[in-house]
């Protein structure tokens, strides 16, 4: 069975290699693909135009999208919906907002094109060797290609979540939890760094990554980072966010659910980008005004 895979970045390419390992043929497309990629992955059938998918894939066609959420996904789905046929299946494996997913599902349903949302976790290693997949959509459609999700997922790492949007909703909350866990780890190492002890953070991370209650993939990544740079001197302390944390908090506000840890983690990321630290300037000025406390000036 051939799978169309659109979006051949780090995640997409690793998914393609995983599919091939599991016996699937992969027809790949990426408008920004570098020429050397084609020679590095001869098992992938690369195409230069979306229309070629119709020729290379068996009916009903299965096309997996692995592109950034938002406008890129929207534009791609619009292009595909104009050339696909009734019964074909699109899978959005990116981090789309679940409300966009349900809207797209309903729009495509009118054209009899099937749409599945697949929250994909595990990073590039997961994509290559076994991911965590949270899948939503029409159950009969999902069941028809269940074998694909089971092949790409780590053991017990795939589940059908429910109707359209549920997969992306679960992935959104997953990423919100990830924000909080990463923030807690970062704050813990900040406290270690402020202590009187001359600690080897690589050794700390190694111990915590093996047998401790907080072991896991995130701690493994900390160990990897400290293995490369004991003091992280080459890294600027600015943290990007890709939107899921904000969406999680917005949903919590709508549903009146308290998630202070996730909210704090997101706001910390926002604050990390504030070069001027203006709020800190205001607080310092207030302390100076009411108590004559020291103010540091340039």
Image (tube, grey):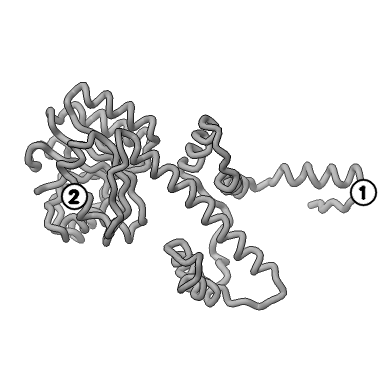
Callout 1 secondary element: loop
Q: Is residue 5 left or right of residue 93?
A: left
Asked if residue 206 shows in the view, the reply is yes
Q: Is residue 248 above or below residue 152?
A: above
Which residue position holds label 1?
A: 292
- Where on the picture, by quarter, is residue 101? top left
Please say if 53 is above or below 38. Answer: above
Which of marks 1 and 2 precedes in the sequence?
2
Residue nearest the observer in this picture, 291 or 209? 209
- Left or right position of 246 against 90: right
Which element carries disc 2, helix, strand or loop?
A: helix
Residue positioned most to the top: 110
Tags 2 and 1 touching, CB below 8 Å:
no
Q: Residues within 10 Å of mark 1 (few under 14, many from 20)?
A: few
Residue 64: where, in percent of width, then height? 23, 43
Residue at image point 22% right, 25% down: 109
Q: Nearer the viewer, mark 2 or mark 1?
A: 2
Q: CA distance from mark 2 to mark 1?
A: 67 Å
Give residue 136's mark. none
- Residue picked out by circle 2: 148
Q: How many marks?
A: 2
Image check: 102 left or right of 113? right
Within 10 angstroms of label 2, few (less than 14), some, or many (20 or more) residues?
A: some
| Residue closest to the eye, 238 or 250 | 250
State the residue at coordinates (37%, 38%).
96
Q: Is residue 261 above or below residue 215?
A: above
Instruction: List x then y, in percent, for residue 10.
Output: 31, 54
The reply to whether residue 32 is visible in this rendering is: no
Image location (x, y in percent) of residue 86: 13, 28
Q: Nearer the viewer, residue 226 or 213?
A: 213
């Amino acid at each position: 069975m051939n799978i169309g895979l659109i979006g051949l970045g780090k995640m997409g390419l690793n998914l393609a290699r995983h599919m091939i390992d599991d016996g699937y043929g992969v027809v790949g497309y990426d408008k920004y693909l570098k020429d050397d990629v084609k020679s590095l992955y001869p098992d992938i059938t690369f195409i230069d135009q979306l229309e070629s998918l119709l020729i290379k894939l068996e009916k009903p066609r299965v096309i997996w999208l692995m592109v950034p959420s938002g406008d890129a996904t929207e534009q791609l789905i619009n292009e595909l919906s104009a050339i696909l046929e009734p019964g074909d299946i699109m899978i959005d494996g990116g981090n789309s907002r679940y409300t966009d997913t349900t809207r797209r599902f309903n729009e495509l349903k009118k054209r009899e094109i099937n749409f599945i949302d697949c929250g994909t976790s595990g990073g590039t290693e997961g994509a290559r060797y076994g991911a965590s997949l949270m899948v939503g959509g029409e159950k009969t459609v999902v069941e028809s290609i269940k074998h694909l999700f089971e092949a790409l997922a780590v053991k017990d790492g795939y589940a059908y979540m429910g109707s359209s949007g549920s997969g992306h909703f679960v992935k959104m909350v997953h990423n919100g939890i990830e924000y909080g866990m990463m923030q807690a780890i970062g704050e813990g190492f900040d406290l270690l760094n402020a202590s009187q002890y001359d600690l080897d953070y690589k050794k700390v991370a190694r111990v915590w990554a093996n047998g401790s209650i907080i072991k896991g993939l995130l701690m493994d990544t900390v160990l990897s980072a400290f293995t490369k740079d004991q003091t992280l001197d080459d890294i600027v302390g600015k943290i990007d966010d890709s939107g899921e944390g904000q969406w999680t908090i917005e949903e919590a506000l709508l549903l009146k659910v308290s998630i202070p840890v996730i909210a704090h983690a997101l706001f910390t990321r926002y604050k990390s980008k504030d070069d001027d630290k203006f709020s800190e300037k205001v607080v310092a000025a207030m302390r100076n005004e009411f108590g004559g406390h020291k103010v540091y000036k340039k």
